Image (spheres, rainbow, N blue to C red):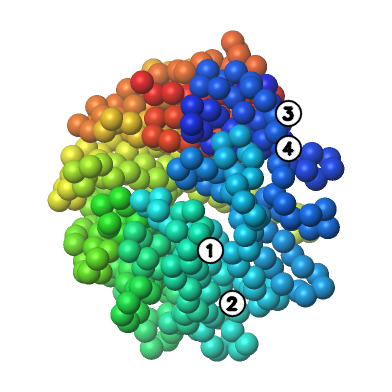
Amino acid sequence: MKNNGDEVIVGGKYGNYYTRNVTKDNNVTFKTFDSKAVFKKETEADFKLGKKVEYTYVKNMMIGKNIINFLGEEKRKTKTFSVYASITNKDFVPQGETLVLSEVNEKSMVNYGIGMSPDSTKVYVWSQIKAEKKKNPNSIQYKIFDAGLKNLLTEKTVELPHDSKDSFVYDCLIDDFENFYVASEIMKSDDEQQREESETYTNITIYPKKGEMKKIPYTFKNKMIDSFMFQLTKSNTLVFTGFLSPIIKGFLKSKKRELVSDELAVVKTDCKTFAEKQNKIINASTLYPDKVSKVSEYVPFKVRNFYEQKDGSLSIVAEQYKSVYHSGYKGNGYYVYYYCDIAVINLDNKLDVKAMVKMPKFQKDVKNPSILSTTYKDKTYVIYEDETKNETAVTDKDVKKSTTSIFSKDNNNSLFLVTVSAKGEMKKEIIYSYDKSPIRPNFYKCKTVKDGEIMLHADDYLGILKIK
């Protein structure tokens, strides 16, 4: 599919694929492609807001037979921020009037978000409101609607259980029962902090549809959470997973050692009762060499994604990542980015390890540093860009290092696909080599549109990767 470079992937559904673009006149247009990626038509959006409304396109959701388009507007006169929703059919024809979902004071708003419940029957919008004093807690205003936006199911303003100066809100979610979840990073007070614990911790606050607020703090003795991810799954379970690094205090502590995330924490909470279902710390030391000696080996793993299968088992996708700052002359410093091994950890429904495998790679300051993943028929798929020479490399010694410089060439690279079965059987293959194709995917713009399908975004083309 031809692409002008500025188009954004909307998604794939109804037997079509869609992209979005903003014209020079600030009009939003949508392109429709058929199941074989053949261009069908281009449609200019009519969100029925009038020419005087200067809005920004925020996101979209494909629910049922319709597409919900979410728009944001900063009103300078009233100093408010509004969130609108325009429902269109698959041909982007408006279905009724544009709705105002939320309106808050712009100066007091810290951040906001829009989301959908796991079963796709509810839509929500939330805003974090700044406290008048730093010592006071911020609040969250949220509304929950049915998927058609015809009925307002819940509207609440809740106070966060920690001071605004000591907390940061990552995200908010809702489950199928209209319970509201807030994930935050909390700075511990002097009274709370223990020597064997980190200075901060991750906390999920639950505001039930009915009943009292509940807090779930994630703290681990002698460990700090290096990276984490949480999801509300279709089995009505809150799943938290994160890599842990050791806390080594004292004058002679090893900063390198703190960069080794050799344990993985997984905690499951029941969304009906809020009771903890499972809690386990998994030894992930096999993802590192027996003796970590090189600086490049002191790279922590980051959770990139995870998938819950029908039987409750989990497949966790991770990647080694770190950035190193080098101070320069007169403050002109620069960052060096390292993206290394890919790991897939398969856990059964008791959180016992079924398989823990990794695909070695070493990438420094590359254009496509990260990875994309999807799941299909109990298998996990990861795509990434690397040197073609690494097609047969399966150990650290075999891997050719990839570094972007003025002398490096894209033609030396290929787009790789790693397949990991439920039993941990791993296969690596080249999807295509860059010396045979002009398509260079930009991973930051690519999108997993559904299980087994990834839309690839390049400067001049759009492609579709289908797992069969």
Q: Quadrant of the N terminus?
A: top right
In x, y percent, where is residue 356?
25, 39
Q: Earlier in the sequence, mark 3 or mark 1?
A: 3
Residue type indicated by callout 4: Glu
Relative to residue 187, is residue 395 depicted above or below?
above
In percent of the image, x 35 and y 45: which residue is there?
306
Q: Earlier in the sequence, mark 2 or mark 3?
A: 3
The residue pinned by badge 4 equals 44
Query: Cβ–Cβ below 8 Å for labels 3 and 4?
Result: no
Query: For the residues marked 4 and 1, what is the alpha-carbon distance in whole angstroms?
Result: 26 Å
The residue pinned by badge 2 equals 129
Query: For the residues marked 2 and 3, what is the alpha-carbon distance in whole angstroms?
Result: 39 Å
Instruction: Identify the disc placed on residue 125.
Output: 1
Query: Cβ–Cβ below 8 Å for labels 3 and 1?
Result: no
Relative to residue 458, is residue 238 depicted above or below?
below
Numbered disc 3: secondary structure: loop
Q: Which of marks 4 and 1 is nearer the N terminus?
A: 4
Numbered disc 1: secondary structure: strand
The count of marks equals 4
Query: Cβ–Cβ below 8 Å for labels 4 and 2?
Result: no
Q: Which of marks 4 and 2 is nearer the N terminus?
A: 4
Residue type indicated by callout 1: Val
Instruction: Identify the disc placed on residue 4.
Output: 3
